[in-house]
Image: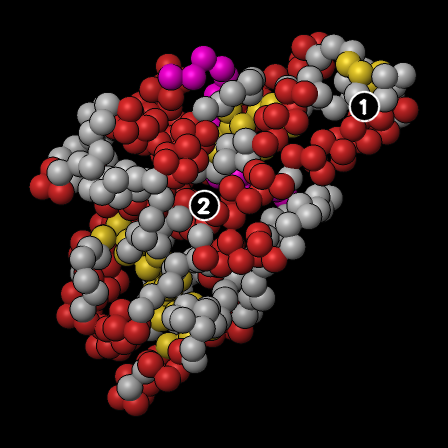
Amino acid sequence: MVVVDDNSGQETAQASSNNLVELILAINSNCRAPLEDYMVQLMEDQKLQGYQVACIIYDSHLCFVDSVATHLKIPGIILRPDMAVYMLAFRYFCQLEAENRIPFPGSRLQEPVPELHPLRFKDLPYPITNEIPEWIMDFFASSVNIRSSVAIILNTTDCLEHSTLSQLQQCYKVPCFPIAPLHKLGATATSTSFLEEDQSCIAWLEKQPPNSVLYISFGSIACVNEQELTETAWGLGNSGIPFIWVLRSDSIDGSQLEDHFPEAVKALLGERGLIVKWAPQKKVLAHSAVGGFWSHCGWNSTIESICEGVPMICRPHFADQLSNARYLTSEWKVGLEIENVLDRGSIEISIRRLMVDAEGKEMRQRMSVMKDKLEAGLQKGGSSYESLNDLTEFISQLPSMVQEVKVDDPATSVLL
């Protein structure tokens, strides 16, 4: 791994905590030159060793990489770490803007999006009932523009999105390689978390009965307000279900989380649960004691839960979380969504529906079937296995597409 210095100082760091889009825009503004400098040196080093750079694989939001790849005549391959439907939802969102249909009537948000079943207008990546700033629209447009890229890799698979993948292939006339779950491809998966994981929860899980524990985590970005935190605590306490609850230190305005729990709630929670600042999520979900996952429904969390056969309570906040939750609850029927304002009564009911009632057991059975399909896809002859082999073969053929170019020094030519 190589760190590319963006020379932006505090600006990017602040953007990361305030606004994810601002962070991505800052990276796109600052990282082209340092990446190009690094790639020129890498290409020269590879040439001396008799090798060449076959391609650059990059996240679709980092459009500056395409500029570098185009200038250096290196094929680019887009990596989409999310569902295929999310890319199509972005396209439809941009279509609405182009047709001057934003602002969109709030009374129609529950209506289905044409050709994007099961999504509703409320499940699109960004609120559409008000005017949208031009810089936001520019960002969305760049996210669906594959520019000069020669292929797309997606962290999804045919058994999850068969018809959607067909739609995507029709929209983009380049090869698409659905390979999922990506985190299961390595022989020994390592943690990619920037937060320190509390391993004590695994020992605690060892003492719990099978399928008895609800795991709660809202990811590394989403925050809750004081009322939501208190209502969640009461609902969780009243449900009587054992739990592991991940509460980051910055989950609520940087204050001490314990200050927001009434003493009665602390007593309820302390008897049968564990609160940690961060957890080794893959290990937790894989543990036999875990019977449910209350999540923000980011795609990494969603597919990790599917891989372990754990049904979900869905509380999406923004972006792809909305479409992911819709698929979980409406298409695959392996999750329950808590909508509107959180209150302790609805929280308690939802938890017991998932963890105790027959409805939750049926979801667990359906999720187990999905888990088996994902595992089969990774085996020889499976869809993800074959797609990965096809991608490898495709990349091996790319050097023939690259020609000799001169970079910086007119006297230095690099064959890629």
Q: Which residue is mark 1?
A: 408
Q: CA distance from mark 2 to mark 1?
A: 32 Å
Q: Residue furthest left?
A: 107
What mark, if any, has residue 272 been given in the picture? none
At label 2, the amino acid type is Val
- Percent position of residue 122, x then y: 21, 42
Residue 210 visible (yes or no) = no
Q: Which residues are magenta?
A: 171-187
The residue tagged 2 is: 21
SS at mark 1? loop
Most foreground residue, 208 or 255:
255
Judging depth in this view, the residue of 106 and 178 nearest the camera is: 106
Pointers 2 and 1 in contact (C-beta within 8 Å)? no
Q: Residues within 10 Å of mark 1 (few under 14, many from 20)?
A: few
Work out whether residue 256 or residue 118 is closer to the camera in this orientation and state it: 256
Q: Is residue 311 above or below residue 400?
A: below
Q: Quadrant of the N terminus?
A: top right
For badge 1, the amino acid type reads: Asp
Does 271 appear above or below 314?
A: below
